[in-house]
Image: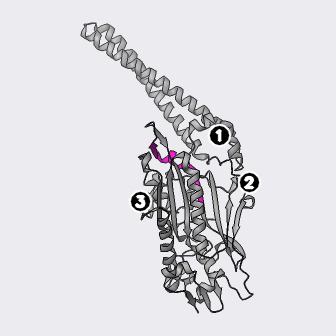
């Protein structure tokens, strides 16, 4: 959530930045600033009224002590009207606060100056592309055919048990899945990220804190009876570990990693985007989360991008890095770099990671602060990234490393899988 002070001091900058997302935010920002002025005035009037009421109450007490009952009763009538006035001002202030919060919740984060204007993924910038695109023969098959043929993944069985988007991994398919999880976690730990095992369900306050609510309410699985949400990513429970905390400067940066299953309704997805492992309702992902001082967050962002890139290099997959345009950048993010791997059989790029800096957007909602050198509290910057999401990594491994008699396993994974090839 954007800070009111930021909008007050950077009105034009915020309007221009949000325009990169294709959003005309001028009226909303002006309404926010007007409501804030009205709220502050109501607060001033309330404080003055309460102070006046307290002063008169003391005078009434003195008058009763002096036996001047008639004068005291007259003043007491005045306190009644002041109490009514105080109640009205309190209600007015609460109404302004509620309206103000709703408007603030409707505004996405202001993009970083590096982010270009754009409407969709077609306007994203390619930062770099690494690795040769494999040239497969005409017999090359998509991953869903390979997975079924080698008894790695059963898509129809998942439909039987639950529904579409819930595959069943078995045999070497399950072993490959577990190997990737352990490989990613080990790589993250080597890079200084502490491992956590968080809950897979969160309450409303947690989903609100990281920005899933109210923005993506329809995309989350909601258990209404318990008021809980199935997590769309480990970012949500991990970042909320620090909600309402004040950290010391020498504790920073904080770097966390976690493996969790992730749950997304993916409403509106159809066609080739949902074939096989391309888009699922339940999938596995290893996440990295960081909290830093504001002046250090972009150095951390660069480091996280390099870290994810090194993992992909060890998997022998061709990849590219994109800097998302304003229209494709997530609601909470100030800047996002996407990693995509090449799907050899589908002949297209598949997103496997997003690395984002949210600056103070999340920490303002969650009140995650630190004490600076002057011992004053200041909001931290939060960042997160996928390191990595498994389904499309598995899809790319099966397609890019397919051979006439099976699938070759990258050397970096062989110590985790216990085999160097999946044979027919």
User: x, y percentage for residue 2?
Assistant: 58, 43
- Could you classify mark 3 by the number of other residues whose Cα lies within 10 Å: few (under 14), some (14-19), or many (20 or more)? few
174 drawn magenta: no
Instruction: Measure the alpha-carbon separation of dots 3 and 1.
Output: 34 Å
User: x, y percentage for residue 332?
Assistant: 59, 52
Q: Name the residue under label 1.
A: 28
Mark 1: which secondary structure?
helix
Q: Mark 2 or mark 3, which has the lower sequence index?
A: 2
Position of 228 compared to 349: left or right?
Answer: left
User: x, y percentage for residue 260?
Assistant: 47, 67
Q: Name the residue under label 3.
A: 226
Q: Residue at x 36, y 15 (%)?
A: 56
Of badges 3 and 1, the one in the foreground is: 1
Instruction: Measure the alpha-carbon separation of dots 2 and 3.
Output: 40 Å
Q: What stretch is highlighted in magenta?
A: 354-372
Nearer-the-camera pick, 112 or 154 = 112
User: x, y percentage for residue 405?
Assistant: 62, 92
Colour scheme employed for the rendering of this structure: one colour
Q: Is residue 215 visible?
A: no
Q: Mark 2 or mark 1, which has the lower sequence index?
A: 1
- Could you classify mark 2 by the number of other residues whose Cα lies within 10 Å: few (under 14), some (14-19), or many (20 or more)? many
């Amino acid at each position: 959530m954007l800070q009111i002070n930021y909008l007050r001091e950077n009105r034009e900058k915020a309007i221009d930045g949000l325009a990169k997302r294709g959003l005309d935010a001028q009226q909303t920002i002006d309404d926010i600033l007007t409501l804030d002025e009205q709220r502050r005035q109501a607060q001033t009037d309330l404080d003055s009224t309460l102070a006046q009421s307290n002063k008169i109450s003391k005078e009434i007490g003195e008058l009763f002590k002096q036996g001047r009952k008639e004068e005291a009763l007259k003043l007491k009538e005045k306190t009644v009207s002041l109490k009514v006035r105080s109640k009205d001002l309190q209600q007015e202030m609460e109404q302004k606060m509620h309206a103000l919060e709703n408007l603030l919740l409707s505004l996405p984060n202001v993009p970083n100056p590096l982010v270009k204007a754009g409407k969709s993924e077609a306007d994203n910038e390619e930062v770099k592309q690494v690795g040769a695109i494999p040239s497969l023969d005409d017999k090359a098959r998509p991953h869903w055919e390979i997975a079924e043929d080698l008894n790695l993944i059963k898509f129809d069985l998942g439909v039987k048990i639950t529904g579409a988007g819930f595959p069943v991994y078995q045999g070497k398919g399950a072993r490959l899945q577990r190997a990737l999880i352990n490989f990613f976690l080990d790589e993250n730990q080597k890079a200084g990220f502490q491992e956590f095992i968080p809950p897979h369900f969160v309450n409303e306050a947690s989903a609100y804190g990281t920005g899933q609510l109210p923005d993506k309410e329809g995309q989350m699985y909601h258990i209404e009876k318990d008021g809980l949400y199935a997590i769309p990513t480990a970012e949500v429970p991990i970042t909320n570990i620090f909600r309402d905390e004040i950290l010391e400067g020498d504790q920073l940066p904080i770097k966390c990693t976690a493996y969790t299953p992730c749950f997304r309704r993916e409403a509106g997805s159809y066609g080739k985007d949902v074939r096989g492992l391309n888009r699922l309702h339940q999938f596995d992902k290893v996440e990295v989360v960081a909290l830093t001082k504001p002046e250090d967050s972009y150095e951390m962002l660069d480091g996280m991008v390099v870290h994810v890139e090194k993992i992909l290099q060890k998997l022998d997959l061709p990849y590219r890095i994109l800097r998302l345009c304003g229209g494709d950048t997530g609601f909470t993010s100030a800047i996002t770099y996407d990693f995509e791997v090449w799907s050899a059989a589908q002949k297209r790029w598949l997103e496997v990671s997003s690395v984002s800096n949210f600056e103070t957007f999340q920490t303002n909602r969650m009140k995650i602060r630190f004490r600076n050198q002057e011992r004053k509290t200041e909001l931290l910057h939060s960042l997160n990234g996928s390191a990595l999401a498994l389904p499309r990594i598995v899809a790319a491994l099966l397609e890019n490393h397919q051979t006439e008699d099976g699938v070759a396993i990258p050397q970096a994974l062989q110590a985790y899988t216990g085999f160097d090839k999946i044979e027919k």
